[in-house]
Amino acid sequence: MNRVVLAALAGIGLLVVLAGLAVTGLRTVNSMVETAAATARAERDNYWRAEIEKSNAVTQAKIAENLKQTMAAQNAARDEVAAAETRAAELEKENAALPDDGACGLSRDRVRLLNKR
């Protein structure tokens, strides 16, 4: 019976060692999977961060271009308003220089001034 018991104990010991090796192997595989997943997540995050930065750069460039166009339009409008104000002042001076004959209504010269506008 000793041999049977020793053989059974040796078999049980062998099973325990094999189970320990299996658990260690599973832990190693699990660690490799977790490392690969973490690396893939980091690469994905870096890719999308770079894409967002590119998109932001394009957006900022468009905003800057729109701002330049807006400023140019404002400057042109300001110049046109200044020219119109200057012309209105000139027309007022010309109107004041015209004789006032006391007649009711607009004289021909004053109508011509209005047409110059």
Image: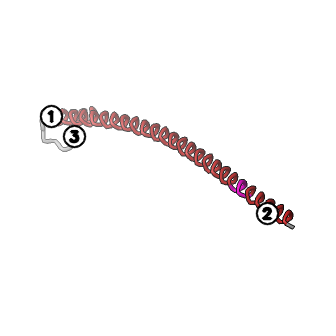
For the residues labelled 1 and 3, the Cα–Cα distance comes to 16 Å
Q: Magenta segment range? A: 19-23
**Residue 97, position in %: x, y?**
12, 33
Q: Kindly indicate whether the residue at mark 3 contacts the one at mark 2 (C-beta within 8 angstroms).
A: no
Residue sitting nearer the eye, 104 or 61: 61
Q: What secondary structure prevails in the magenta region?
A: helix
Q: Which mark is residue 106?
A: 3
Q: Which mark is residue 56?
A: none
The residue pinned by badge 2 equals: 9
- Within 10 angstroms of label 3, few (less than 14), some, or many (20 or more) residues? few
Judged by depth in the image, the label closer to the viewer, 1 or 3, is 1
**Residue 113, position in %: x, y?**
23, 33
- Which residue ends up furthest to the front in the rendered image? 2
Amino acid type assigned to the residue bearing label 3 in the image: Leu
- 29 vs 62, left or right, is right
- Within 10 angstroms of label 1, few (less than 14), some, or many (20 or more) residues? few
Residue sitting nearer the eye, 90 or 36: 36
Residue 34 colored in magenta in the image: no
**Residue 23, position in %: x, y?**
70, 56
**Residue 56, position in %: x, y?**
46, 41
